[in-house]
Amino acid sequence: MTKGSLWKIAALALGVFAAGCGGGDDDDTGSDSGTTDQAAAEWAAIPTTTDVNGGNIYVNTRDMPMPADYGCLGMADTTPGSVLTTLTVNGTLFDFQNSTTPVVAATVDVWNDIAKLGMTPDATATTDGQGKFTITVPGVSGKKRLHWRSRKTGETFDTYELADPFDFSAAAPMTQTLNRNSVSIFTGGALPALAGITRKPGTGVIAGSLRDCGRKEVGNAIATVLGSDDKPIPGIKVVYMSDQNLPRRRDPSVRHSLATNAKNGIFIVVDVPPSTGTVKMVAEGNINGVRTRLAEFSAPVFADSVVVVDADPKR
């Protein structure tokens, strides 16, 4: 999927946000409501946090909401995985903000199993003077997705792209092109504090785009990161994107500022404490008035890093 908006919001979250700055939509006013108690209250009160489509999730736009397709929810994905044993990937590592600017002399790592994240990568490459890399990934037989990290000491945040799909069809070529993106430290610190929040150094960010079974962006849903008690981790902040792909300032009086919108389905969770295990990113929304878990993804979180995931339907 195209992750341009995800990269922008993730980098904003990694920057040092200053409280009291402006918001995204011209009707999104008010102060940050991302405190622990408010986040937990909003998570518990999802039926009252949205203002279109009767509080149910939807696709298309707020002005013309259409039913979201979650017919595949809870159904096992029986699609066969890759028949390849190894996959060669050619790509270019780009700076997310300047999407045509390559990142040179950077390290690109890849794992074929998310359980290995944090261990020695399955393959590693260094980008050349044009930001290009070639990497051969072993052990892709039966796999459908790869897990990437890009990094350049002193210049970029460690940037993880998890559960990133590749062509695993029966006719898939043994060499594929998969470009990567990286968030620079300069960009993360320099972008304006549009969400009006302050990120704690040493914490991580999880960003995702919620999609239904037809891969359409979903509105009227909320997201968070849960601890072992299945409740929001204390201290986290959740921010959603406006129709203009800018982070909203959270305002309980503007109810759609507290949920995803169907133009991008994007959410970010800020101040996620680093974990030696995994945390659970979840998204929920109402389907025909019934609160439903739409997406669930477990991943480790690393200090001062950004993790980008596809929030696909829970299978």
Image (cartoon, rainbow, N blue to C red):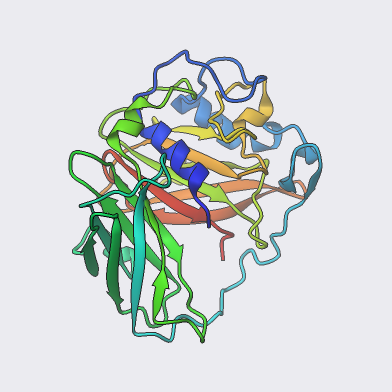
Q: Identify which residue, 48 or 212, lies in the foreground.
A: 212
Left or right placement of residue 272 versus residue 252 in this view: left
Depth check, front residue: 197 or 75 = 197
Quadrant of the frame with the C terminus: bottom right
Q: Quadrant of residue 138?
A: bottom left
| Residue in the picture at 48% in, 15% down | 21
x and y, in percent, of residue 270 in the image: 41, 34
Tell me: 11 left or right of 56.
left
Q: Position of residue 221 (x, y in %)?
A: 63, 43
Which of 114 and 228 lies nearest the eye of the viewer? 114
Q: Position of residue 313 (x, y in %)?
A: 59, 60
- Horizontal side of 7 relative to 300 (left or right) equals right
Above or below residue 234? Residue 293 is below
Q: Position of residue 256 (x, y in %)?
A: 67, 31
Task: Give the residue displayed 80% in from the left and 37% down from the top.
Answer: 63
Is 234 placed above or below 252 here? below
Residue occupying image coordinates x 45% and y 70%: 166
Q: Is residue 279 left or right of residue 77?
A: left
Which residue lies most toward the front here?
A: 129
Residue 232, visible in the rendered structure? no
Write down the quadrant of residue 90 in the picture: bottom left
In the rendered image, which quarter is residue 62 located in? Answer: top right
Q: Which residue lies at the image location 47% right of the left edge and 80% below the top edge?
A: 81
Total marks shown come to 0
Q: Does the rendering let one see residue 106?
A: yes
